[in-house]
Image (tube, helix red, strand yellow):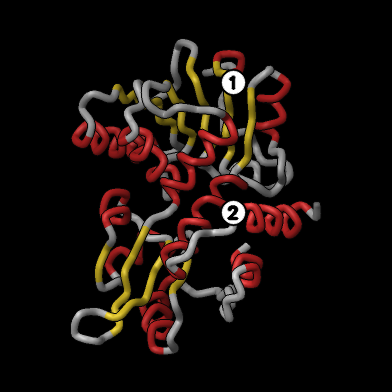
């Protein structure tokens, strides 16, 4: 999507993918800065590690405690510094609004998985004023930690570790279950029925329809996958790097062609 956007705007830029072992992340960031890169995107497991590896953090990275975008820019003393951002939270919020017509303020949300992107999602939902948050995670203590963090930040938001016992507005899957054929569902339907929610969002975008989304559609829920989150976090990163408006429609088409062959 970025290369399509660069081409559309006539920018002589190129977006490249590199596999970096976590133990070499600091060196990789320094190397990119030394080679004159405009910036970087980081994927799991680098987002949390990078918080302590950049020269400064944007408010978004400070707020969500993770870095998925880095910009290299000239500091006041003329040296190049690395500035860390988080565009995931904003990307998710925009996708939920556009793809599912979900207004986060006042919503009741069940979040499956609170590691990495799930933690950022939980904090974003609370920041936006969700009425109730239900956190389900394989390691219960991790969900309890996030619940405490949310209550410290937003004591007005009700946070429960476990499944809801009543109807809610949204279920969000932030686990990796559904990526591989034969994966178990991230949702325990003995604990919660999809008939009790009006919408389901799965951060996974390949396959386009996970078993969770298929089950949700069969239950009459409105559904969306994570392609929108990928698009909108990328659009924000594009603006950070280039200072130009992102050609979102072109970026969306490039994603759909690359991922789904449309």
Question: Is 188 placed above or below 241 here?
Answer: above
Residue 214 at x, y percent in the picture? 72, 30
Residue beneath the point at 33% across and 37% down: 141
CA gap between label 1 and label 2 equals 37 Å
Residue 239 at x, y percent in the picture? 45, 62
- Between 135 and 82, the one lying in front of the other is 82
- Between 113 and 69, the one lying in front of the other is 69
State the mark number for residue 248: 2
Q: In which quarter of the image is residue 257?
A: bottom right
Residue beneath the point at 64% across and 30% down: 223
Q: Name the N-terminal-most of marks 1 and 2.
A: 1
Residue 258 at x, y percent in the picture? 73, 59
- Between 10 and 129, the one lying in front of the other is 10
Q: Is residue 132 left or right of residue 88?
A: left
- Between 246 and 226, the one lying in front of the other is 246
Question: Is 208 placed above or below 71 here?
Answer: above
Q: In this view, does 195 lie to the left or right of 238?
A: right
Residue beneath the point at 45% across and 12% down: 165
User: Looking at this rendering, what residue extends furthest in the right direction?
Assistant: 262
Residue 231 at x, y percent in the picture? 57, 52
Residue beneath the point at 63% across and 58% down: 251
Q: Quadrant of residue 4?
A: bottom right
Q: In this view, does 207 lie to the left or right of 24?
A: right
Question: Is 198 placed above or below 24 here?
Answer: above
Alpha-carbon neighbours of circle 2 within 10 Å: few (<14), some, or many (≥20)? Answer: some
Q: Quadrant of the N terminus?
A: bottom right
Report which residue position mark 1 lands on.
189
Question: Is 101 placed above or below 21 here?
Answer: above
């Amino acid at each position: 999507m970025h290369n399509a956007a660069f081409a559309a705007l006539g920018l002589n830029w190129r977006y490249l993918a590199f596999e970096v072992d976590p133990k070499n992340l600091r060196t990789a960031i320094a190397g990119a800065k030394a080679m004159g890169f405009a910036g970087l995107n980081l994927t799991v497991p680098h987002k949390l590690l990078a918080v302590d590896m950049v020269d400064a953090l944007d408010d978004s990275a400070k707020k969500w405690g993770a870095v998925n975008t880095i910009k290299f820019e000239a500091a006041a003393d003329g040296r190049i510094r690395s500035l860390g951002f988080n565009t995931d939270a904003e990307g998710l919020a925009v996708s939920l609004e556009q793809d599912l017509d979900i207004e986060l303020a006042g919503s009741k949300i069940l979040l499956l998985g609170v590691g990495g992107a799930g933690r950022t999602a939980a904090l974003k939902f609370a920041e936006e004023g969700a009425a109730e948050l239900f956190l389900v995670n394989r390691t219960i203590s991790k969900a309890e930690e996030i619940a405490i963090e949310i209550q410290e930040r937003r004591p007005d938001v009700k946070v429960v570790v476990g499944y809801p016992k009543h109807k809610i507005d949204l279920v969000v899957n932030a686990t990796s279950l559904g990526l591989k054929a034969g994966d178990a569902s991230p949702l325990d339907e003995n604990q919660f029925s999809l008939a009790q929610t009006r919408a389901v969002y799965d951060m996974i975008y390949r396959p386009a329809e996970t078993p969770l989304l298929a089950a949700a559609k069969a239950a009459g829920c409105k559904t969306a996958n994570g392609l929108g989150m990928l698009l909108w976090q990328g659009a924000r990163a594009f603006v950070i790097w280039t200072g130009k408006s992102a050609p979102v429609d072109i970026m969306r088409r490039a994603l759909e062609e690359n991922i789904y062959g449309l």
